Amino acid sequence: MSQAAKRAKVDRRTHYNWLKDDPWYVQEFRQAVIVAGDSLQDKLTEMAFEGNVTAAIFLLKGLKAATFRDRVEQTNLLEIDPDKLTPAQKDVIAQHLIERAFADHPEVVPEVRRRLEAGELVRAEDVLPKKVEATFESEFEEIDEEGTEK
């Protein structure tokens, strides 16, 4: 809008004030937007017919959206069969879970990954700093094996 205001030799805030206060200006502005859009569409069409592939694709996405739209696949994670995931998908999920599990200690994530890739069992107490491990253990020392407080 700033460039258009400069070309019209008015402060850009004036445009917004007119939109707010002048019904005639609102109508004229809407019409100008339609004319500008038509003009741009005509130019884009011309470019497409001159061989500009990008312009052609852009036009087709608008004119034949069902065929040329960008596709987005959505999956409900609760309905995923883990056995049907690709190794790459499993890696992405594993990476996310590791980062979430160790969100408070991102410095241990590379070590966790290394151990998992080596086929090792990874326990929090094996990778967290001893101070954190002690805090972790003290939070649960008042609870017995059956989950009831002592």
Image (cartoon, rainbow, N blue to C red):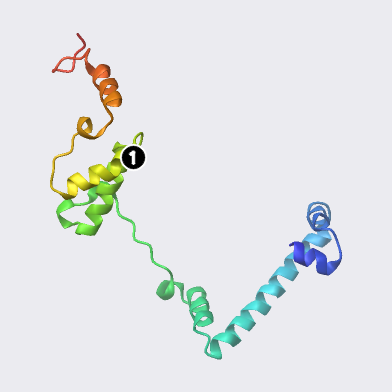
Q: In which quarter of the image is residue 23?
A: bottom right
Residue drawn 55% across the image and 90% down it: 49
Task: Establish if 71 lies above or below 12.
Answer: below
Q: Which of 134 and 68 is in front in this view?
A: 134
For label 1, the SS is helix
Task: Establish if 39 lies above or below 117.
Answer: below
Task: Establish if 146 lies above or below 87.
Answer: above
- Image quadrant in which the N terminus is located: bottom right
Residue 28 can be seen in this image: no
Residue drawn 34% across the image and 39% down it: 106
CA neighbours of label 1 inside 10 A, class few (<14), some (14 to 19), many (20+): few
Amino acid at pointer 1: Glu
Q: Nearer the viewer, residue 135 or 30?
A: 135
- Image quadrant in which the C terminus is located: top left
> In the image as oriented, which residue stretches furthest toward the front?
130
Q: Is residue 61 left or right of residue 120?
A: right
**Badge 1 is on which residue?**
107
Residue drawn 34% across the image and 61% down it: 73
Task: Establish if 138 lies above or below 31.
Answer: above
> In the image as oriented, which residue stretches furthest toward the bottom?
50
Q: Position of residue 76 (x, y in %)?
A: 29, 50
